[in-house]
Amino acid sequence: MSPALRRYAVRALARKLSLDSKPILVGPWRSEVGFEGLYWIPFLRALSAHVPDFWQRAVVVSRGGGSVLYGQWATIPKEGEPKLEDWRPVRAIDLYNLRTVAEVRIQNLKDWSETKLQKQTRVTPWDRDVLRTAAEAAGTGKRYHVVHPSWMYWALEPFWEEHMGLRGLLALTDYAPIHKPPPPITIDGLPSQFVACKFYGRATWPHPHPETSAFVADVVQKVAAQVPIVLLDSGHDGDEHVDMKLTGANIHTLPKLEPTINLGVQLALIGRAQAFLGTYGGIAQVALRMGVPSLSVYTQFGGTAHAHLSLSSWLSKRSGVPFTVGSLAEAMMWRQTLVTPTPMQPLGAPLPAQIPETVGA
């Protein structure tokens, strides 16, 4: 179906939702957090502009406390810590309160085995059952609308497949910044200023691997010598990504957190951070959406669409938020080029004991 007809279908969905005041179940979202911040929430915001009281009627079903991405501040704080009473959260039911982490993971793997996609491109019987449970938990009754992620995946597919340009994408999305959420809990012992860090294995960043491990250890050590680092550990096996374990001076780790708040805590810490450092992927994209500068790396650009990087680059330029992405090979070239200049040695002077350290490696 052409992009124009897909836009028409989405408008028809908005008209249907506007015909009554029944609750709207949004989700369940069980895909990557990068897609949630980069596409799903912008899609919902654009849809909600055509549906009266959309967010007052909505019940968001996300996972791990990820629903904090959907909330907003009544007034944007200018200085100091924001007051929690100024925060307007959406009405939400956490998926991990309805199903275990293992059950969600098994369903995602089942989708992959059947479609070869880690995307919610269809409403599965499992999703319908979760929505019925969510409706019971929220007390909405048996009559409600559903806005399932498959709507977003279907509507925006032409952009990822390069059959639709940025203008077509913007006709279906709203890229107002995502507000930095308050933490769901207080974690003692963390520095007031820090860099949030998350290096993990994925298609673009193999782990375990000697080259990536050596690179990360070196970079994190250099950054930690200048500013505290807070590691965003997942704490559970919610997806196929495996966190790289890092230790050292000025490196802080999170305590073991409950699955229902784990992601929410990580997102809140990204919002508080001076910058994000890690693997190129969803977390770096969410940092950008919250206005946090980021530097992320990959080895070979495979297993992901270039459209995501192009969109992130456009958002970075439009917002003025640095979003630096480079390959491991590019990083090595910069390290060989940007060296600390040294004064010319007089004749007969001994040579330096070692090669000068690189800058900003």
Image (cartoon, rainbow, N blue to C red):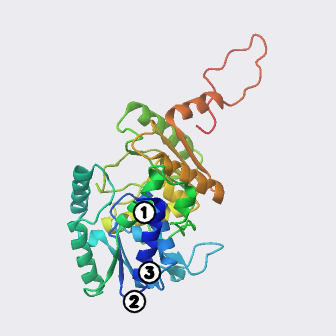
Mark 3 closeness class: few <14, some 14–19, many ≥20 residues within 10 Å: some
- Give me the C-alpha separation between circle 3 and circle 1: 16 Å
Tally the marks: 3
State which mark lies toward you, 2 or 3.
3
Q: Looking at the image, which residue is at 61% across and 39% down?
A: 360
Most extreme residue toward the top is 348
- Give me the C-alpha separation between circle 2 and circle 1: 24 Å
User: Residue 222: where, in percent of width, then height?
Assistant: 55, 40
Residue toward you, 229 or 270: 270
- Give me the C-alpha separation between circle 2 and circle 3: 12 Å
Residue toward you, 191 or 281: 281
**Quadrant of the snapshot with the C terminus:** top right
- Mark 2 lies on residue: 21
Residue type of the residue flagged with mark 3: Arg
Q: Looking at the image, which residue is at 41% across and 84% down?
A: 57
Query: Is residue 185 visible in this depiction of the protein?
Result: no
Q: Looking at the image, which residue is at 54% across and 70% down?
A: 179
Assess whether mark 3 and mark 2 are in contact (beta carbons under 8 angstroms): no
**Quadrant of the snapshot with the N terminus:** bottom left
Residue 15 tag number: 3
User: Residue 121: where, in percent of width, then height?
Assistant: 32, 60
